[in-house]
Amino acid sequence: MRDTAIFLNGVYEDVLQDILAVQSHLPDHIMYVQPHKSQQIRMLADNPPSTDDPVRLLMSITTDLPHVHFVAEIVGWDDKRTLRGDKLRLLNRLIYALQWTEGGVFGCGPGVAKPCVNLLYVRRTQSLMKPFPVDQLTNVNDGEPPSTNRTQAGGWIYVENPTDAWLAAYL
């Protein structure tokens, strides 16, 4: 696991529940998270994660932005603007079948004014039994805790990766 994790601010809980419906039985089954932003997650674009080199993902939900509710491992990344042909059709089929609330790969087709760029491949998603405040994380850019005064979903920050032992207290 890498030293830097990603905190994703405000994921729809129904999307995460779809993922848990599968991964609670098959934790290594890859599912998908699609942040609603038109910027690349540079760390993933420059050094894509893999099953052998995952990146921890910490997520708040849209109804409770100041608290981390879910953790997962990012094991792959795609720039949705480059998806075409058989790969895009296959991803759409998988997402329609297993994450029906997502409606397939979104925000990447022709005519989309502000495309959504990042497609995250995730495994081992877990819901925290005890969500913790975002300000318990440490932003790697300035060494400060992220603000818990969050009013709008969207975006991400790079944070120090919490240890498994530390996270165990919340699982």
Image (tube, rainbow, N blue to C red):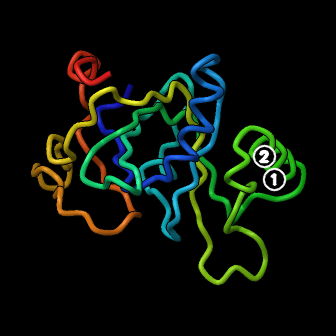
Residue in the picture at 82% in, 59% down = 84
Q: Nearer the viewer, residue 91 or 60?
A: 60
Snapshot quadrant of residue 107: bottom right
Q: Position of residue 92 (x, y in %)?
A: 80, 50
Residue in the picture at 74% in, 45% down = 95
Residue in the picture at 89% in, 49% down = 86
How many labels sit on residues?
A: 2
Q: Position of residue 168 (x, y in %)?
A: 27, 17
Location of the C terminus by quadrant is: top left
Residue 42 lies, with reference to residue 161, above or below; the image says: below
Q: Is 93 on the left or on the right of 19, as rendered?
A: right
Q: Position of residue 99 (x, y in %)?
A: 70, 43
* Dot 2 amino acid type: Leu
Residue in the picture at 76% in, 82% down = 111
Q: Which residue is mark 2?
A: 91
* Dot 1 amino acid type: Leu
Give the secondary structure at mark 1: helix
Callout 1–callout 2 Cβ contact below 8 Å: yes
Which numbered circle lies on residue 88? 1
Distance (Cα) linking label 1 and label 2? 5 Å
